[in-house]
Amino acid sequence: MLLRDGFPGQRLRVLPAPLTRKALEEPVTRRLLVTDAGYFPHAAAHGRLRPDGAREAIVMVCTGGCGILTIEGRQHRIESGDAAVIPPGVPHTYIADRLDPWSIWWLHVTGSDADELVERSVGSGADPVLHLRDVYTAVALVEQIVSLFEGDETTATLYQAAGAAWNLFGLLCSDRLRGEPQTSDRIHVVQEYLRANLASSVSVSDLARLAGLSTSHFSALFKASTGSGVVEYVKRLRSARARELLMTTQLSIGEIAAQIGYADAFYFSRQFRAVNGTSPSAFRAAAASTFA
């Protein structure tokens, strides 16, 4: 049995039909309107069978696991780091993998510009699945929409959601034009993600999945590209941010440690010394005297 929703930790928002009809008669939102958006983590048995298609276009961004999308008799595998775009009115079926069910961020859009945006993001080859060069930005845009809808359903919110959807389609159309990303692009995206999420705890296997590579292949390529493993790379990124905070703020050592992802200030101090050859407090004192 396929499940439409009801997954632990899911987020789901759907606009009421009267509001959708009204918004499609208003400026801006009549051109592009997000009607549904959500997040289904580790969605075992998730799937839909739509013999007549959906009224809206659907975008799904996979951040873990995998699944199969079937359109017009052709199966398309969706894996971590992939996006799938399903045009409105096209019969389709999709289902999460039984052994490794996907985690997906998704949205439905409609409006006078939706068809053209979908056409450009699918491309001349009519392939509904593409591997994203920057899956993190795509996820952030869908998450922004979900968060907006969790707040309220005002016209202002619908405008913001439409803007985020435009950005998402811009990303998809750009990736379609550029073609399949090279391995170096995937490593670069991971580096950007780590820089933007210093306080987050993420495993090497998670990063490998988001890069669309096996863990061993990703680890080897990451070291070849950066000169170090992921753990050392993150330590040095955190150290650089810590030096900046030590020089430019009055935050305590513990507060700085927490901001860059260390729950234990003593452990942070040891890691900082390993990179900089001095303690955080000594570094701050030396910096103060240098720039006094």
Image (cartoon, rainbow, N blue to C red):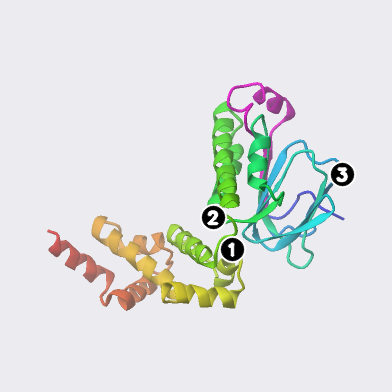
**Viewer-proximal residue, 112 or 61?**
112
Residue 143 visible? The answer is: no
| Residue 18 horizontal/vertical position (percent) | 72, 25
- Give the secondary structure at mark 3: loop
Residue 245 visible? The answer is: yes
Query: The disc labelled 2 sits on which kind of residue?
Result: Tyr
Query: The disc labelled 1 sits on which kind of residue?
Result: Leu
Query: Which residue is label 1 attached to?
Result: 210
Left/right placement of residue 155 relative to residue 25 reads left
Query: Which residue is label 2 attached to?
Result: 136
Report the Cα–Cα distance between label 1 and label 2. 9 Å
Q: Residue furthest front?
A: 124
User: Mark 3, residues whose alpha carbon is within 10 Å: few (<14), some, or many (≥20)?
Assistant: few
Q: Earlier in the sequence, mark 3 or mark 2?
A: 3
- Give the secondary structure at mark 1: helix
Q: Which mark is residue 251?
A: none
Magenta-colored stretch includes residue 84:
no
Q: Which residues are magenta?
A: 12-40
Report the Cα–Cα distance between label 3 and label 2. 32 Å
Report the Cα–Cα distance between label 1 and label 3. 31 Å
Q: Earlier in the sequence, mark 1 or mark 2?
A: 2
Q: Is residue 289 above or below residue 25?
A: below
Query: Which residue is label 3 attached to?
Result: 51
